[in-house]
Image (spheres, rainbow, N blue to C red):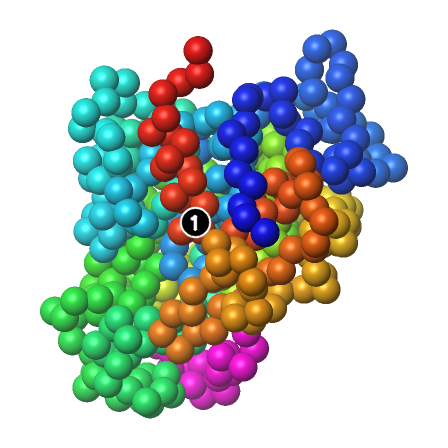
Amino acid sequence: MALNWKKTAGPQNRSEGPRALSEVVKLKNGRRQETRDGGSPEPSCTPRKHVAFLKTHKTASSTILNILYRYGELWNLKFALPFVDHLGYPKRFRAEFVKGFAKSRVKEYDIICNHMRFYLPEVMKVMPIGSFYFSIVRDPVQLAESAFAYYHNESPAFKRAASLVEFVRHADTYYNSSEPNSHYARNLMWFDFGHDNNMADTPVYVRAVLGVLERTFDLILVAEYFDESLVLLKEALCWEIKDVAHFKLNARSSDSVSPLNATTAEMVKAWNGLDWKLYRHFNASFWQRVANYGHERMQQDVARLRALRQRLSAVCLQGGAPVASEQVEVAKLRPRNFGKAKILGYTLKAGLSGHTLVLCQRMVVPEQYHLDHLQKMQSLPPLA
């Protein structure tokens, strides 16, 4: 099965995909209103299309990237794309890292979402005033376990250690902050947010950085509560449930995950003290957002999102579940393993065609192939 990419023609393709999968949308007074199953219509609002996403590492961010790619492509939005696969990382972001920025007369984009080390003054050169800024955090213990598997061959500190347990027991011996890619081994989220991951963990410094992040980002999602996070994101952006429908991407197989005991977990937290405080802070603010949203309403909307995902799975996926990458027959749907991590992918059902095939392919394609497609589309001259 070859990839059946198809350039969207604009908002008229908004309901692309199987009709049975569409949420119930009613028009009232010329404005969109989404109706919950058995509930009342949501307040009418204008969907936000200027979005800046800080794609942090090993935080389920690849799935969010896929959501943003699909939404932007559907609406013909302009992405601030990288030259290769990231925006100058691990250097702090500069506007010139965006492909075509230096030569473009109109230096305004709708969505920026690829890996970068955040630096607000430069991001603001690319994104319009009033853009929606968001990111995602993950429990540093789980993040460190994932990073050790994924970046074992990239980070000298990790490469020297036989296991994460051994690394955190002797971190001061293995870790050298002056080595390339050392940031993968300590306070990786703090680094991605643009700050010094080797700074002393002092209350004054931590409070100052967290205050800056609070003022910069409109929403911080939490990877452990991914569906709840997407409901909050949908609400903040005035999108629909179907806009955040997804299959989990870039996930590892269970046999490449190494659970950590409580003692090791505490050592990981101590070694990544800045990340632990970052996570605790935004985990707390996340649950305050959930409380403001309403717990019962959240449960209902999470149930809607999961039901939609089940219907999409029944339509798109052979076997209804992810498989080992070597079992994915279509090359451009096959994810690449990295380091010690064995990445799962998806096999689509045979016989898919038309809009259904396009929708299903877009939901499971690895991010590099999706990015390649978007770069080609944005390099094409506009339609007459």
Which one is in front, 199 or 112? Answer: 112
Residue 233, picture quadrant: top right
> Seen in the image, is 302 located left or right of residue 79?
right
* Residue at 87 percent of width and 37 percent of height: 38
Where does residue 202 sit, x and y in percent of width and height? 26, 64
Question: How far from the left and from the top, in percent, is residue 258?
Answer: 49, 83
Q: Is residue 310 left or right of residue 384?
A: right
Magenta segment includes 184 = no
From the top left corner, tell me how far across and down residue 2 is, in percent: 54, 48
Q: Residue 283: tell me if it is visible.
A: no
Q: Residue 225 at what x, y percent from top left?
A: 60, 58
User: Dominant secondary structure of the magenta stretch?
Assistant: helix
Q: Residue at x 19, y 86 (%)?
A: 173
Q: Which residue is mark 1?
A: 369
Residue range (magenta): 252-271
Judged left or right of residue 102, residue 260 is right
